[in-house]
């Protein structure tokens, strides 16, 4: 069974939340919420990209993170 996690990158470094979300829809919704509400990763990776990646390493969704 695939799971999904949220990744952040800015070209120099990357990080992920370590989630094992069960559906891509829920993972995308959580990522979109993070973009709207902000969090420390959004601040740290401003100008980069937020992505939802499945457990096989395939990116299924991504969006730019607005710069500061």
Image: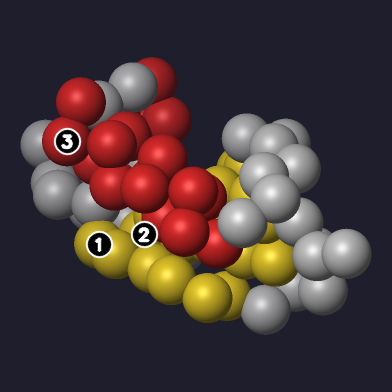
Q: Nearer the viewer, mark 3 or mark 2?
A: 3
The tag earlier along the polypeptide, 2 or 1, is 2
Tag 2 and tag 1, C-beta contact below 8 Å: yes
Q: Residues within 10 Å of mark 3 (few under 14, many from 20)?
A: few
Left/right of residue 13 with respect to residue 10 in the rendered view: right
Cα gap from disc 1 to disc 3, whole angstroms = 12 Å
Whichever of callouts 3 and 2 sits on the residue coming sooner in the sequence is: 3
- Marks 3 and 2 sit apart, C-alpha to C-alpha, by 14 Å
What residue is disc 1 on?
Answer: 64
- Decide: is 62 above or below 23: below
Spatial CA distance of label 2 from label 1 is: 4 Å
Residue found farthest to the top:
40
Q: Is residue 6 left or right of residue 3?
A: left
Front label number (1 vs 3)? 3
Q: Position of residue 57 (x, y in %)?
A: 75, 73
Q: Is residue 10 visible?
A: no
Which residue occupies the foreground of this view, 42 or 25? 25
Q: Which residue is mark 3?
A: 36
Q: Position of residue 32 (x, y in %)?
A: 29, 47
| Residue 2 seen in the figure | yes
Mark 3 residue element: helix
Q: Which mark is residue 54?
A: none
């Amino acid at each position: 069974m695939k799971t999904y996690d949220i990744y952040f990158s800015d070209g120099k470094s990357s990080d992920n939340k370590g989630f094992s979300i069960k559906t891509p829809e829920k993972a995308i919704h959580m990522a979109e919420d993070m973009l709207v509400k902000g969090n420390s990763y959004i601040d740290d990776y401003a100008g980069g990209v937020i992505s939802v990646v499945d457990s096989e390493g395939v990116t299924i969704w991504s969006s730019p993170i607005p710069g500061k």
